[in-house]
Structures are given as C-alpha cells and as structure tokens.
Image (cartoon, grey):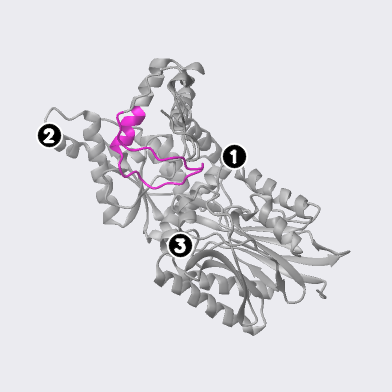
Amino acid sequence: MTESSFRLALAQANATLGDVAGNADLVRAARREAALAGADLVLFPELMLAGGQAPGLALLPAFQDACRRTCEALARETADGGPAVLLGLPWVEEGRIYNALALLDGGVIQAVRFKVRLGAEGDDDEARVFSPGPLPGPVPFRGRVRLGLAIGADIADEEVAECLAETGAEMLLVAAASAFRRDTGDVRMNAAVARVVETGLPLAWLNAVGGKDERVLDGASFALDHERNLTHQLPAFAEALAVMAWRRERGAWRCEAGEIATVPTADAADYAACVLGLRDHVRRTGSAGLLLALGGPDAALAAAMAVDAVGPERVRAVVMAMSDTEDRGAADSRAVAQALGIPCRLVPAAPLGALLAETLGAGIEAATGAAAARGALLTALAAQENLTLLTDADAAGSLRVDAFDPVKPFSATEIARLCELRQRWKPAGSLGPDGAIVPAAWLAQRPDPQRDEILSALGQGRRVAEIVADGHARETVMALQEELRRTRSRAPSAAAGVSLTAAGPRQPRRHGFVDCGEPVHQPDAALVRGVGRSGGESIDF
C-alpha cells in the first residue's frame, strides 16, 4: 500500500423496503454529494438496495434479479472516475442467498463479502432466508488501504473482526441496519470499542435510518480511531452524509476529528423514534394525512407527534360527543388543536350510539356501543379523505382503514412524562410548533404507577406470585391479568405502531390459562428416571 490518505463518506440513508429503483437513485444522489466533498469511497447501510431487512422479498427470484441488475448498473457507472461504492444487497451465489456488501469501483464489482452472524437481533427470518457467509478476508482498495468489511451483528463478538485483523485488514468498516431499542446506544458503542481494543484497528459503524413497519432504524452512526477516541458522531433519526479524512501515520490509519452530533437519550429518544416511525409510515402508505379523535393526554401526545411528523396542514382532529349533554373535555381538546394549528370539528356520535342500542337491544354494554359508534364514525371519516387513522389498539380491531398507534409502546405513566417533555422540547426536524401543547388540567391527571408496573410485569411474563411478592395486592394483580387477557382477545388486528424493546415470544390472542398465584413449583427429581439421555446410553425403564 503506497498512498497515505483517502476520504471516506458515510451515507446514513433512509431507503424504502422493496423500492430497488428508488433506493438506487438515493445511492446516486449520495455519491454525487460525496464526490463534491472529495470522497474516494462511499459506504452505504446494510441491504441498502433492498431497502432494509426484507427476508420475504429476498426469496423472490424477480426481486433477486432486480437487485443484481441494479447493482451491476451502479457498478458500470463507477467507471466515471468518481467515488467507489460499498453497497449492501441480497446476493445469490450457487443457489444460496447471502446478506452481502459489494465494492463497486472502476466500472466493475471489485469484491463481495457476506454477513456471517445471522439473526443476532432476534430476527429469525434473517437466519431462515439468508445463508451465513464464510469468515472474510480484507478487501484491497485502490492500492491505498486494506478494508475489513463487516455487516451488522458481525461485530457483536470478536470472531469476524479478529479474522479480518489477522489476515491484514487496516481498518474496520461496518454496514448496519440496526433497530432502535432503549439503551441500545451503549450496547453498540461497547461492542465497537471492544473490537477496536482487540484488533488495534480504527472502526467506522454506519447505520441506516427510517421507519420500517414497527422497527425504527435510528442512524446515530459513528467512527472510532485506533485509540478508541470518538472522531465522528452522526445525528440520530435523520439522514446525513459525513466525509471523513483518513491519513496513514506511523503505520496506523488516523482520522481527522469531525462533527460530534448530540444524540437524544431516554424519553427524548423514544419520542423522536415514534415521530420518525409515524412520518415514514405516512410516506410509504401514500396516505393524504392523519386523523385522530382528541380527548385526554394520550390523544394530545399522539396529536403532537402527528404534527411533528407531517406538519399541521396534514393533520385533522375530531371531538366525539357521545351524548347530547356530555362535554368530554371539548374545550381542552379544542385548545390542543389550536396550539398545534390543526382543524378540529365536533362529531355528534350520540345518534349512532342510540341506533346501535335500539338495534341490538338492552344486552349491549354501554361501553361496547360507544366504542362501536366511535370506531364506525372514525373509519368513515378516514376513508372519505384517504387519511391514516391514529387510534389505540383496542379500537383498531374493527377498522378497515390504515391505522397507526403512535403511543402504542407507552404506559400511562410514560405518556404523562412525554407530555411534560413536549411542553418544553421537540425533536430536531420537527414540523410542529414550540411551546405548551397539553392543557394543565390533563397534565394534572396523574396515572397510577402501580398499575403500570403490574401490567409491565405481566407483559414480561412474570409470575403472579413474584409480582405479589414485590408488594402488590394479589386481587389487583389478578384483576389486571384478566383485563390484559380480555384486551388481547378483543383486538385481533391491533393498529401498527413503533416497537422500542426487543420482541419476545408472541402470546396467542385467546387461551385458557390463568396464573392463580401459586408459589414456584419445586420439581420432585426422585420421580424422574431419565431426561434427554443420548442414544449411546442405557435405556430408561
């Protein structure tokens, strides 16, 4: 290697699932921008050309062909002498599908490397569809530097990075499409620092950004020098392109210090993730805008997120009047709409509720009739104007329009906290107004933290006996367990929404098991004659 410097661009891009042609246009635009900044090489996120993790699409021969055809077209375009491209895409080789990173330079595909560690983020579909690649060696780049290419979870442990270092890599470049999870920033940084310590090599970690169904990819890409110093930090929840200047000094590649963006954490990160997820949901569904029914802190928070995501001109609000005399906080709801700059109309739902009661008779519960009337009216209003309906999971089951629940991940306590946060802050790139949004009367409605704590514990699968041992009343825990079971059974098609935690095993909507709070069972080992013995051992009798 003779050259002593080169310039690397990190393209933190927001690709669209399945839109191969559109994603290729993003690659071209970023390459042009990087060329103007003097970049020699542009790194794109994992599976950039496919638009992210799309295992089902990756199985389609036509989709595989589209990705390969487009990759080859982009490779030919690099004959213009501009920056080379490191492009993520699904790659078919000898009948197997790989999650690949291809180096496009000089008019050809110079090298291809495959992802080794599959399904590490709990994505079982990835491991079922893609084949794991062999441990990789470095890729020479223009006679200047030997690049160690890794994809996503390849740097979760030492195996891939150490193999690259031992075979001559001089720096580690990681293309990722990692979903935002609470406190995930520390996990990523700790893994990257560990790989730098083990190999002695600098590392650039590039993440995709954007909402992909319930997953939100947060970007927040970064670079570390060989002494573990943070040289670049890209923003979270936003597209960005950063060009880094690298120079070989005393046998090691050093990166000139660049911009260190402030990355939101805790409640601010949760809020920003939901806004980005909602914005991209609207963009990718082709919806004309958003519709929601105001009334209470949760709806006020959803309205603020909606305006922050798409702007006040694309949000509509209604206030449902379920009786001729019931105000239902209409004045406060109108105050929220006015603060956000969105139109708000009063919709009389009482006549429809009365019709339902008359048709179905006295056996219908009042709450059931009110929910049905509310759902029917909201559905009709949303369908009339091609709007995405912002609704809770309970109301979404009977809806036949596009529905999204922006506050789905949050408990009542968290909603109250986020409402207070939005009074004094909004995320970068927000299209909504500054200042107070939620009426003081609604902020004064303090939720029951014990209820949220019990529901959270039940959702995590903890035993009733353990929750009671934490100091909660057994009767309360049992009642909330039954409430949770009823809610799941009545919402077979809950509205889409952002997930902020790692997904656990999905429970069936209806089942007959009830945890009665029995103490932990101690198995009687004396009753068991043999467990899981290998075929070479004696037969159990």
Q: Main secondary structure of the magenta part?
A: loop
Left or right of 320 in this view: 302: right
Name the residue type under label 3.
Answer: Leu
Residue lying at 68% horizontally and 65% vertically, measured from the top left: 137
Dot 2 or dot 3, earlier in sequence: 3
Q: Residue at x 77, y 64 (%)?
A: 170
Q: Residue beneath label 3, please?
A: 17
Tag 2: Cα neighbours inside 10 Å, few (<14), some, or many (≥20)?
few
CB within 8 Å, label 1 to label 2: no
Quote the CA–CA distance across marks 2 and 3: 45 Å
Question: Which corner quadrant holds the N terminus?
Answer: bottom right
Percent position of residue 341, x then y:
44, 49
Residue 224: percent from the left, percent from the top? Answer: 74, 55
The tally of labels here is: 3
Residue 125 percent location from the top left of the image: 45, 54
Marks 3/1: CA distance? 28 Å
How packed is label 3: few (under 14 Cα within 10 Å), some, or many (20 or more)? Answer: many
Q: Which residues are magenta?
A: 483-512
Location of mark 1 (residue): 266
Question: Which residue does the numbered mark 2 point to in the structure image?
Answer: 360
